[in-house]
């Protein structure tokens, strides 16, 4: 015990390198946060999935749902998040996502054909969404089958690969 006390008395800066390293790391983290905030002021935002930076002037680069997701991360992000949402939340978000995909990425609405299996290209990103015209009921106001979804209540939104 006497030896430990003497060593700490002989070297009063024994704990200083760890404290200095912690202080330096804290300063670097603070500076990095300031840099990211500055980039946001310049119209550059970061994808919450891959952490890459994108210009906000390109509206098709980022999908904003409260967090920012870049177009490249959307397929894996959607697979993960759609499982975690309540039905109402998922339907609201998929409506926004399908609109964004159609507007910025040339996605097309594909209605299912009765008794017909459609070709699926694994390179295409696609989601099944509630039909906006019949609100998922499959029927129009007159009670007839919805012509937009062929009565299924859903349509596929397909982004060309």
Image: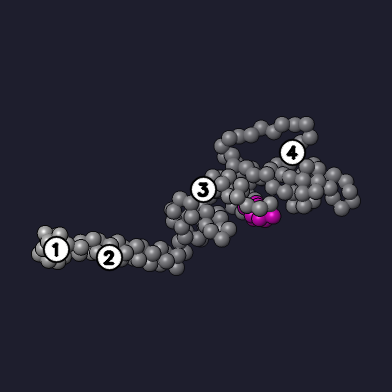
- Image point (45%, 50%), residue name: 50
- Image point (15%, 59%), residue name: 1
The part of the chain drawn in magenta is 88-97
What whole-number distance in Å separates the C-alpha atoms at marks 2 and 4?
A: 60 Å
Residue underneath mark 3: 73
- Image point (39%, 64%), residue name: 33
> Do the residues under discs 1 and 2 have CB atoms within 8 angstroms?
no
Q: Earlier in the sequence, mark 3 or mark 2?
A: 2
Q: Which mark, by number, is residue 126?
A: none
Q: Earlier in the sequence, mark 4 or mark 1?
A: 1
86 relative to 21, above or below: above
Mark 4 Cα-neighbour bin, 10 Å: few <14, some 14–19, many ≥20: some
Q: Nearest the camera: 72 or 67?
A: 67
58 relative to 9, above or below: above
Q: Earlier in the sequence, mark 4 or mark 3?
A: 3
Residue underneath mark 1: 5
């Amino acid at each position: 015990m006497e030896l430990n006390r003497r060593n700490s008395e002989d070297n009063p800066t024994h704990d200083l390198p760890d404290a200095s390293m912690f202080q330096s790391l804290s300063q670097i983290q603070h500076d990095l946060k300031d840099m990211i905030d500055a980039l946001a002021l310049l119209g550059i935002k970061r994808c919450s999935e891959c952490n890459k930076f994108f210009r906000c002037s390109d509206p098709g680069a980022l999908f904003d749902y409260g967090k920012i997701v870049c177009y490249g991360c959307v397929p894996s992000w959607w697979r993960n998040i759609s499982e975690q949402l309540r039905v109402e939340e998922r339907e609201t978000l998929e409506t926004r996502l399908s609109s964004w995909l159609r507007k910025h990425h040339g996605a097309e609405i594909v209605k299912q054909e009765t008794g017909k299996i459609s070709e699926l290209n694994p390179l295409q990103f696609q989601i099944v969404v509630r039909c906006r015209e019949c609100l998922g009921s499959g029927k129009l106001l007159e009670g007839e089958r919805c012509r937009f979804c062929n009565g299924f209540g859903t349509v596929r939104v397909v982004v060309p690969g």
